[in-house]
Image (cartoon, rainbow, N blue to C red):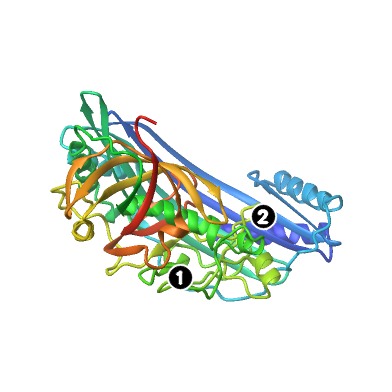
Amino acid sequence: MRERDLATRVLEMAQRASPGAEIEATVDRHRLALTRFANSVIHQNVGEDTTVVRLRVHADGRTTAGSSTALDDTGLAALVKRTVEAVRIAPRDPGWPGLAPPADTGATPPVDAATAAASPADRAAVVRAFVDGAEGLETAGYCRTNHSSVAFANSAGQSVAGESTECGMAGIARQPLPDGIADGVARHAPRRLADLDGAALGARAAVKASASADPLELPPDRYEVVLESTAVADLLESLAAFGFNAKAVNDRRSFVRVGEAQFDPLITMVDDPLAAGLGFDTEGSPRQSLVLVDAGTTAGLTHDRRTAAEAGTESTGHGVGAGPWGPYARAAGFLSAGPPGPPASEVDGPAADASVAELLAGVERGVLVTDLWYTRVLDPRQLTVTGLTRNGVWLIEHGEITRPLRNFRFTQSYAQALMPGAVRGVGGTATQLPGDTYTASSPHWTAPALHLASWNFTGGASG
């Protein structure tokens, strides 16, 4: 691989410039392409082929890092020079954990050649199917593909390289209403473009939009809820970043306590980065499948080398770089009764799939929520989050959807929403969902629907 040769070359240049230092070099190439559509027409197709070289140096008790996209001799020499010079004036780093030792990485799925080589026409075909599936409603969204090649080398002898592919689609269908517009949403992020069913997703979004006419405004209160997978993805992202992140735990900013029964017994949460892509993290540590919650009991944390050294344990391969966030899961999911899969193609009502309909049957009076957005953490110690619903909310009465509702604001502790006795059901189908639209190494979530005993809606359409 060209990336492996480049990583070795940069490492050797840095070793000559700073003999005896601890050094690591990473070369990260992403071929990310995005096809966007609005008003049911493709309006933008963009692609980038970007290679970033990252260098980290630890010498005399100090650490610094630099990066460059200039790959010629001049650019690489400049990267080495400024990084080595910067380490001399960097602050002391008493928590430096040392470099990852040589180690084998876990097995990962083979690269899907068709996804790696996807053309604008291939993505346009998925968009065309989405638009057709919406059957005349106005649509908007995106389809993306990405092929990543990463190589890592350090002065301790660790040298690894790997490839991965991924794709994703998110789209809405819009239904004009007398007093506004109703949106319905559908998302999916399989590993192969061939598994992305644009027609089923477009039909799913259209059914939700069409079922949102004449919404009722329900007063703010605590309601029993069924959260569809698109809403559950926000819980997973927040738990990954603020809950099971070992830096947050070490800093006492997280509610998570390993070994305690903090969740309902129906909740099992696993991060499986090997199934999602590369077998090593940004520090060269092998990635591994990690059980975070086992039948309600908190079982593990995501560690990088620094947090592992603080806690007296080993890295779990969740390093994400030298930033302030710390190590967090990027391929986490709640286990369901069935294997991960796309939303059901049978779209005869606003529920996402048959497993959602089964959860609705257990609700005497509550709310079905399609999506959560604009969420912000108010209290990381309780993981209290505020945000809004969108893309479809309905009243549930006697196990059936009876009418659409206007959107709510909510203020809810995600930890309390999942605590023992709070989870009344987990959907039998888990959907693979995309994270950020534009980030090359975007996280992915595997989310079933959840039936929760209580959700705190604190405001409605009128305030």
Look at the numbered disc 1 and give the secondary structure of its residue. strand
Give the x, y percent position of residue 261: 47, 73
Quadrant location of the C terminus in the rendered image? top left
Give the x, y percent position of residue 436: 45, 46
Tag 1 and tag 2, C-beta contact below 8 Å? no
Front position among marks 1 and 2? 1
Report the disc number at residue 322: 2
Residue 285 in sight: yes
- The residue tagged 1 is 293
Q: Quadrant of residue 310?
A: bottom right
Give the x, y percent position of residue 106: 50, 73
Query: Which residue ends up furthest to the top in the rendered image?
Result: 178
Q: Amino acid at mark 2?
A: Ala
Report the disc number at residue 115: none
Give the x, y percent position of residue 121: 30, 41
Q: Nearer the viewer, residue 71 or 129?
A: 129
Q: CA distance from mark 1 to mark 2?
A: 27 Å
* Residue drawn at 84 percent across, 63 percent down: 19
Q: Quadrant of residue 399?
A: bottom left
Q: In terms of sequence position, does the residue under pointer 1 or pointer 2 come before the other?
A: 1
Look at the numbered disc 2 and give the secondary structure of its residue. loop
Q: Nearer the viewer, residue 5 or 291?
A: 291
Image height of 173 relative to 313, above or below: above
